[in-house]
Amino acid sequence: MSREGVKVRVLALLTTAVSLLANLTFSLLVTRKLETSSLGVLNIVNGAVITGLIIQTIVSFMASRVTARDGKPSIHMLTLYLLSGLLGSLIALLYVTGVSWRFRQIYLEVAYLTVASTFASYLQGYVSSILTVIDRVRLQWMGLVTAVVKLVSIVYIMYSGWSLFSVLVSSVAITLSAAAYGLTFIIGKLSNIGTLGKYLRETLAASWVPLIGYGAGNLRSMDSIIIGYVGGVFDNAMWQVLTVQGKALGLASGIINVTYGELLSGKELERRFYVDFLILTNVTIMLSLFIILYEPYIVYFLRPQDYSFIQYLRVPVILLAVSTLISIINQYYSWVMQGVDRVDFNGEVTFRTYVGSLVFHAHFAEFILTVVYVASIYPLIELSSAIKLPSPVITGVLLASILSTVVSLIYRFTRLRTRHPLNIRARLIITDVAAPAIAASVLTYVESALMLSAYPPVRGAIAELIRVTAGAVLTSVTYLAVALICSSNLRSLLVTLIRYISGANSRAMTSPHP
């Protein structure tokens, strides 16, 4: 892997870590300060924005691919994206209006800000799609800009009395800041290549591909939509708390965009697939151990006024960790499949272009996921209720997520293997992933049990924050130590990263060999 490849991965991890810190700080304070009813409304708004992004599923898919094909971004694709944003904002408005009976007194404010947030998300989506292809380093810097604005917005929310209105306004400002940063770079590179009509035809012709599995690519989004309608305000509030915990699990997800952008740009797959797979799985497992085993600290820090959440979320947080790990691997396979198959680079895209391609199978796997998810969610909610699992609505949703994602991953794995066999030996998965995970789980369980016994959760933000931080540091150190003992490939990867950061490695890294 080239020095540039190492650079963008190091920057992706560092940027994601800073962004994660800002996201957690923002989300923790908001979740801690907002009233339970406001948390429920906030989750409904999130569901509305996600629903409004259905069109972005199509245009973002095409924006990245036609930019890679044409070699430069086009002003006509930007125009198409903005028009799509207007339509998506209308869809989000209809969603909010459909459930407005739950918050009639503040409907107008919520509706205005939902529309603004949706349109801002389209702008940010366009910028991300283009930078994924033309400048992946700047894409990471965009994340840093977002993190800084998010931290600054906390001051505004604080002086606004921690109101729901101030949180929604800040969300719009945060999203717009990221879009503005990226647009200042992209605008100077816009070309007049193509026409609005051509890109519209291509987008419509290809729309069936991303639409066959809309929503499944981000299962957390579908969860929010389902709980927003099925669950009560209490369920929505608990889901918001659970979502905050789940944010930590996305630390390594920035690697996926890097891999996809490189593959679209013509880089080879084999030399980077296993490296990125190791980073994704090990970082996610490490963070999963933290949120599972130190759950009482985290929940009590988020909602000290809702102490009962600790009991209700004990099982869901385990399911969330399992679901997120499988989902990240599943999405990694999806983007790899779409990156290696450049079937649409040979001319104008038509309805038949993607038939039988890996791009098609990657999205058809999402359709399979959606079907299994929708078919299983109600029975699993009823099963969770029948066997008296805590939070049956949330537990049932997460069980459906796990089941459907596993089915989808099996499909993607088999399809990719038929076209691009990747010789990854089972022995390596055991030594590089399974062994560190099992050993670290045992050690971290003992550490957390001793720590929770000696220092139980207490009221007081500072004292609880110290406990949460100590748990995170202890989990990270333990996992890293165990991983380096168990895996020679992880030792090699760490040495390479250290050499790059210190400037000792000037040309290339030695990748782990599957």
Image (cartoon, rainbow, N blue to C red):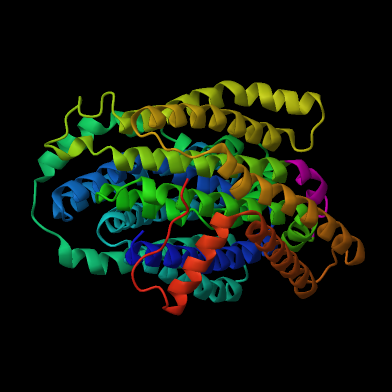
Name the spot of residue 285 as percent of width and height, x first: 63, 50
Residue 388 visible at all: yes
**In the depicted view, which residue is nearer to us: 364 or 499?**
499
Residue 456, magenta (yes or no): no
Residue 306, magenta (yes or no): yes
**In the depicted view, which residue is nearer to us: 425 or 503?**
425
The image shows a total of numbered marks equal to 0
Residue drawn at 52 percent across, 61 percent down: 492
Residue 430 shown left or right of residue 150 in the figure: right
The relative height of residue 355 versus residue 56 in the rendered view (above or below) is above
Residue drawn at 71 percent across, 69 percent down: 469
Q: Residue furthest right?
A: 454
Which quadrant is home to the N terminus? bottom left
Residue 155 shown left or right of residue 361 in the figure: right
Q: Quadrant of the rendered structure where residue 448 is?
A: bottom right
Name the spot of residue 124 as percent of width and height, x first: 35, 57
The relative height of residue 402 versus residue 84 in the rendered view (above or below) is above
Q: Quadrant of the rendered structure where residue 423 is?
A: top left
Residue drawn at 68 percent across, 31 percent down: 396
Name the spot of residue 49 as percent of width and height, x first: 45, 47
Specify the segment rendered in magenta: 305-315
